[in-house]
Amino acid sequence: MTIAAPWVALVLLSTLVPVLLMLWMLKLRRSRVRVPAAWLWSESLEDLRAQVPFKRLRWSMLLALQLIALGLLILAAARPRVTTDDGRGERTVLLVDVSGSMGTRDEPGGERRLERVRQSLRAAVDRLHPGGLFNSDAGRTMLIAVGATPRVVQPFTSSRQVLLAAIDQIERTDEAASIEGAFELARAWAAVPDPDAVETAAPAPVRLELFSDGQIDDLETAAATLRESLLLHQVGDEDTVNRGLVQVGGHRLPEAPHRLRPFVTLEGWGLEPETIDVRLAADGVGVALRRVELPAARLVDDTLVPGRIDVLFPPIDAPDHTLLSAQLLPADALDTDDTAWRVIPPPDRARAAPAGEIGPVLARAMSAVDMKMTTQEQADLLVGVLDSPVRLGARPSLTFGAPPVSAHVGTALSVRSPDRVITSDPRHPVTGGSSLSGLRVQEAVHLQVSDEVRTLAEGQNGPLIVAWREDGVPRVHVAFEMEQSDWQMREDIITFMVDAQAWLAGRSDERDDIRAGDTINLVLPGAVDSVEVLHAGTQLAVLTPPDPSRTQWGPAPLAGVYEFHWQSGDASGVDKVAVAMPGAEAGDVRGRTPDLKASAGDVAIVAAGTRQMPLWPFAVGVAFVVLLIEWWVWTRRQ
């Protein structure tokens, strides 16, 4: 329990209690006396005049009740509070998780987690800056929003009103939160809380209070190096179940490029199978509705693996740019991942030149996707099988077998061995539409790659398909020849070739890989004067690109479709960019209690909403009851 105004209680105690005792000592105690005649009153009056004003106090229930009531009222004036943690008078940084999982409703129709955290933040401000006549605001508090990139919402201040206004300005995002940068930002501000002030003494230590559902991947590792004290206000139900769309896309049919075959991927974190509806739309017009059975999640080595299903829709006409959108019905705990979008570019064919030998299976695959062969001077990309590393020119390349000469990719062993694809990258444009799991290889090269290389297909012995940029030139390498695998018997070989040539030739919409929290880079059609950025009909920014042929904006805080309206002289146009949720792992929105261990500071976890409870209303109420009892006792004695 804390006392907000102890000096007030001390002053009242030292003045009012003596006054009450003195009144009782001065009080004349008259008793009832029966007399047989009126002339006997004269003796009684003489006795009354002879009484001494100050007499020794005797036990009285009325006095005891009055002292109890007075003590309770003095206690109420001191403003006592019961609290789990104070922090008043210190420097405190309130860290607020604004990631996508904070948009979850743990109860149907209930408040989002961020709204519950907003109430906890107001309670924290009440605790740190209670205000009032007998309270000082010696402490200072700042507010930081924790997303993909931390953002200072309010610098250090001792103003209660400023902090409450800043809490109302906090907005939810669909980003994945990272706490390490927020800790560093808080530490930097704590070192110099007021850049304009001239401070001679070292600043006092800072306290950190984090309001989150625990769905921060680097929370445990970042907290392990903390020197400051950390208090985690936990929010979120560990039993909350979510399912969402991982991706939506489409592939043009090789025999009919103006036709598009859409597909969606769903994941669910519930322990029971679920029947849901998937609605597909093209350019805002509904084209299909499918009812699917989403498998249940399962535990593998104490890790919950979500149930997953791929849904393939019939082909649709899409001769130009097409905006595909999918929606799950009905909505669940996290409705923001129940909808996903993707912009499909118009059909086009790349021109290729041989980088090495063209085997029979590769030749058939190139013919199936209508890849035109030409000279290296006119080619958009190079394609071929390499027996040994060779140096390629400044052209994008799709190679098989031995890797080309590169600063990022080499061979780990001189021998080749059998292998099998374990996983493939669903986020990259080259493998996003192909299900390569289980692909068997008779002879594969053992690749050794740097951190600059992205693995598109992982085998038992290492990477089997990789992508990277060599001095800005995109390259894709497959560590085996098509003839040395069962790929030639699978349909996804055509999908892979279509997506690979589109990405290498710069004709795939690489912007589809943008996630909430990423920066959008846009290539503009010629010299553009200005670009207006809109999301859901709301203007976000008006840009004047320093380079009239390209622009960038971000980070994009929310998932959805961003429209870039550009103006170039008398010409104008609109370019759409689809931004997805952070990733499949973001679909697990169960409230999580992390295992926090700081290196030097203290760490504690409390339920969100824990606050100081004022006791003065209870004290006043009990005092009122005591006075009622005292009045009842007095009336009974009359």
Image (spheres, grey):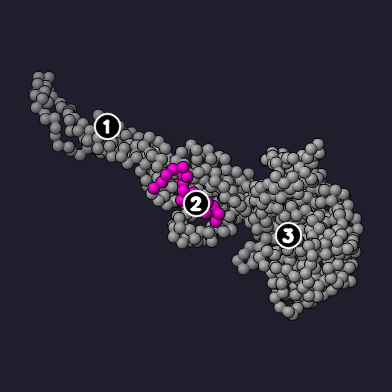
- Check disc 3 and give the amino acid type: Gly
Residue 472 has which mark?
Answer: 3
Between 177 and 337, the residue placed more toward the observer is 177
Q: Nearer the viewer, mark 2 or mark 3?
A: 3
Q: Which residues are magenta?
A: 179-200
Q: Residues within 10 Å of mark 2 (few under 14, many from 20)?
A: few
- Element under disc 3: loop
List x then y, in percent, for residue 427. 72, 58
Q: Residues within 10 Å of mark 1 (few under 14, many from 20)?
A: few
Check if residue 230 falls in the magenta segment. Answer: no
Question: Considering only order in the chain, which callout, 1 or 3, is on the residue closer to the N terminus?
Answer: 3
> Is residue 84 visible from the viewing direction of this image?
no
- Element under disc 2: helix
Question: Considering only order in the chain, which callout, 2 or 1, is on the residue closer to the N terminus?
Answer: 2
Tell whether 522 sits left or right of 43: right
Tell whether 402 sits left or right of 348: left
For the residues labelled 1 and 2, the Cα–Cα distance comes to 66 Å
Tell whether 285 sits left or right of 414: right
- Check disc 1 and give the amino acid type: Trp
Q: Residues within 10 Å of mark 3 (few under 14, many from 20)?
A: few
Q: Which residue is mark 1?
A: 634
- In the rendered structure, are the residues bearing label 1 and label 2 in contact, judged by CB atoms less than 8 Å apart? no
Q: Quadrant of residue 530?
A: top right
- Element under disc 1: helix
Q: Residue at x 66, y 52 (%)?
A: 518
